Image: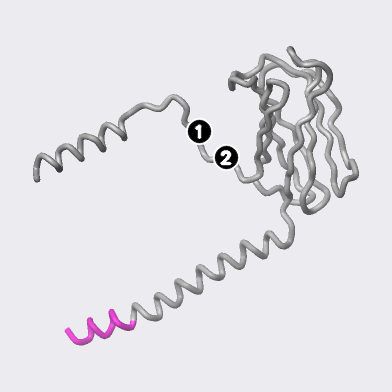
Amino acid sequence: MVELRSIVLLLFLALVLTPTSNAFAHSMFNSAESFLGGYRVQVATLPEFPQIGEPSIILVRVTDSDFVEVDGFTLGIRFFYNEQQIDTIPPKSYQGAHVDYDYVWEKSGNHIVRVDLYDMEGSSGVLTYTFNMGTQSPFGQIFFIAIIIGALTLLGVIIYIYFPRKLKQKSRS
């Protein structure tokens, strides 16, 4: 029995202590990535749920198909709402693989964001990556409030059931 326990413990330690070369943290809710033309574009928003009329940040990262960050690129962004273009960030050249844009969302709901990469090596023309980006709507706030109320109600029921029993046990002793 002792040998079996030792073997299981050693296997567990070996699995836990084995180094990993590619470990990725949980991605944000309002983030996405897309591969096209030998390149990968990742987008995300901070905060994860942008509020209407408040500043947020759009984070963009460009890598090649082997996940190696590019040295520089030319990028533009177009924003669509209900199939109508509502805003644009004109094309501009950047050094490095990361770009942050300050942006204020004006409409509630789902937006289509098209990221255009220009003149990338090995591709001809413009590479257009399409993403869905959501903003915080009143429904979203109601959803979070409903979850909080449900959790508090469950806590109240548990306290209502558990504490009277504890008090009865203490009063008997």
Rendering coords of residue 167 (x, y %):
28, 82
- Prevailing secondary structure class for the magenta stretch in the rendered image: helix
Residue 47 in picture, x, y percent from top left: 65, 44
Q: Secondary structure at mark 2?
A: loop
Residue 171 pos. (x, y %): 23, 86
The residue at the far left in this view is 2
Residue under label 2? 27
- The CA distance from mark 1 to mark 2 is 8 Å
Residue bearing the label numbered 1: 24
Do callouts 1 and 2 mark residues in contact (Cβ within 8 Å)? Answer: yes
Taking the spot 59% from the left edge, 18% from the top edge, the residue there is 68
Image vertical order of residue 127 relative to residue 102, above or below: above
Kind of residue indicated by mark 2: Ser
**Is residue 169 part of the magenta span, yes or no?**
yes
Q: Which mark is residue 67?
A: none
Q: Residue at x 40, y 80 (%)?
A: 160
Establish if 136 lies above or below 153: above
SS for dot 1? loop
Q: Position of residue 35 (x, y in %)?
A: 68, 28
Chain part drawn in magenta: 164-173
Number of residues whose C-alpha sits closer than 10 Å to that of mark 2, classed few (under 14), some (14–19) or many (20 or more): few
Membership of 105 in magenta stretch: no
The colour style of the image is one colour
Q: Amino acid at mark 1?
A: Phe
In this rendering, position of residue 99 left or right of residue 148: right
Query: Which image quadrant: the N terminus?
Result: top left
Taking depth in this image into account, of 103 and 1 the one nearest to the observer is 1
